[in-house]
Image (cartoon, rainbow, N blue to C red):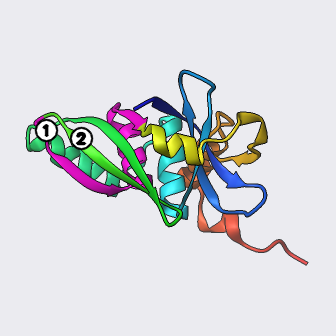
Amino acid sequence: MPQVRVKAVGTDAATTDRVVLLEETSGSGRIVVVAVGEAEALAAAAALEGVQSARPGTHRLIGAVLRAAGRRLVRVRVHTLRDAVFHAELDLDDGTRVDSRTSDAVVLALLLGADIVVADAVLTVAGVDPSTVVVEGLGSGSGELEAFRRFLDTATPDDFDEPPR
């Protein structure tokens, strides 16, 4: 299975869906566009940019549970595309495979430093030329997410009052 990296997290300009772009690291550099929920998009963007919240969210919690159990996430495998839904598994260091939503698997891979691979058959069907992908970024290196989180960390209720008329 070819390895991919998370190129960006953002909004599909055509559909306004939140998406994660998985870029083939060798070969033609095809992009797999994975639609994700809002929460997963924010979690992926935060992980991609190295932004951490004060308390652990679900994905960081899962990572902590794996570590506490003495396990390590080795790889995320996106193995199937069925009925427009990507299917993934988490491969642990002891050979255990865990079924996962692709969006959650990608966030875990980002947080835990695991490889992400995509089946050749999935890349053949869903991989697109990078020049055809237009995404408005959340986590594409813009730093907008980190700046917004810094604002929220220091914001007070007065920051949200309506201006006087």
In the rendering, which numbered label is found on residue 84? Answer: none
Q: Is 105 in front, or is 132?
A: 132
Q: Does 84 lie within the magenta span?
A: no
Q: Which residues are drawn in magenta?
A: 94-117
Task: State the residue lying farthest toward the top.
Answer: 26
Q: Residue at x 56, y 49 (%)?
A: 149
Residue 51: percent from the left, percent from the top?
A: 48, 40
Q: Residue at x 48, y 57 (%)?
A: 40
Q: Residues within 10 Å of mark 1 (few under 14, many from 20)?
A: few
Residue 54: percent from the left, percent from the top?
A: 38, 49
In the rendered picture of this protein, how many numbered marks are placed on residues?
Answer: 2
In the rendering, which numbered label is found on residue 95? Answer: 1
- Quadrant where the N terminus is found in the figure: top left
Find numbered disc 2 in the image and state the secondary structure of the residue it sits on.
strand
Q: Which residue is mark 2?
A: 91
Height in image: 36 above or below 6?
below
Mark yes or no: residue 1 visible: yes
CB under 8 Å between callouts 2 and 1? yes
Q: Does 100 lie within the magenta span?
A: yes
Q: What is the quadrant of residue 117 in the picture?
A: top left
Q: Residue at x 63, y 25 (%)?
A: 28
Q: What is the quadrant of residue 119 in the picture?
A: top left
Q: Seen in the image, is 87 located left or right of residue 50?
A: left
- Quadrant where the C terminus is found in the figure: bottom right
Question: The disc labelled 2 sits on which kind of residue?
Answer: Asp
Task: State the residue lying farthest toward the bottom.
Answer: 165
Mark yes or no: residue 55 visible: no
